[in-house]
Amino acid sequence: MKKKFKVIILSLMLIAFFTLGFMVKGSSEGILFDVKVLELIHNGRNPQIFSIMKFISFIGSEKFLIPITAMIVAYTLIKKNYYISKLLLISTLDSYILNFLLKLFFKRTRPVVYFLVNQGGYSYPSGHSMVTMTLYSTIAFLLAKKTEDSKKKILIHTIAFVMICLMGFSRLYLGVHWPTDVIGGYLAGYVFYCLTIELIKE
């Protein structure tokens, strides 16, 4: 029953992802609550928060994550922890590749009127949100596997959840994504994470 429930949830998430995707396909406009949320966030801007959000966004970018993950994967390969190597490699590199392909398919324009930093490429789904959802969930999964302490497990997953949320918010604060891009990134990232954990066995 548990596995059947998980399949239903992931199926609903995929349906939500593609529903949003086709709603914004080839569009340069916000939908649903997009404009209202960005207006609300950008009405309360200040330089200190901008600097923090810019840093958070950087540590979720490929310029930071790919080199760091590559070093960790190299270390795990040396230690012959091939299971960890495969999970980390898939949750970063493959997630970036899938995100790139999805963006090419949906071709949604970024909310350029809200830009606080320059950003190229298409908008849906958010790459930062998708990759960090996949990667941080994978890291939390691997760390939680190593402890029997339920409180530590909860702490690990809570930290991952907070980091994932902050990453999405940073992209909204910097004005480079619509809120529905971030939601789409989370949906795709979580489904990709679950499929990876299910398919890659220790």
Image: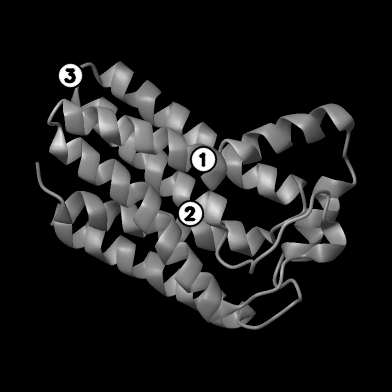
As drawn, the label of residue 130 is: 2
Give the image location of residue 69, x and y in percent: 39, 37
Residue drawn 39% across and 22% down?
Answer: 155
Of residue 37 and residue 103, the one placed in the foreground of this image is 103
Q: Earlier in the sequence, mark 2 or mark 1?
A: 2
The residue that disc 3 covers is 148
Q: CA distance from mark 3 to mark 1?
A: 24 Å
Q: Earlier in the sequence, mark 3 or mark 1?
A: 3
Residue type marked 1: Ile
Residue drawn 36% across and 31% down?
Answer: 71
- SS for dot 1: helix
Residue type marked 3: Glu
Any part of residue 140 in sight: no
Give the image location of residue 99, x and y in percent: 47, 63
Give the image location of residue 58, x and y in percent: 63, 38
The residue that disc 1 covers is 164
Q: Residues within 10 Å of mark 1 (few under 14, many from 20)?
A: many
Q: Residues within 10 Å of mark 2 (few under 14, many from 20)?
A: many
Position of residue 3 relative to residue 134, above or below, is: below
- SS for dot 2: helix
Residue drawn 55% across and 50% down?
Answer: 128
Q: CA distance from mark 2 to mark 3?
A: 29 Å
Image quarter of the N terminus = bottom left
Of residue 64 and residue 168, the one placed in the foreground of this image is 64
Any part of residue 105 in sight: yes
Residue type marked 2: Met
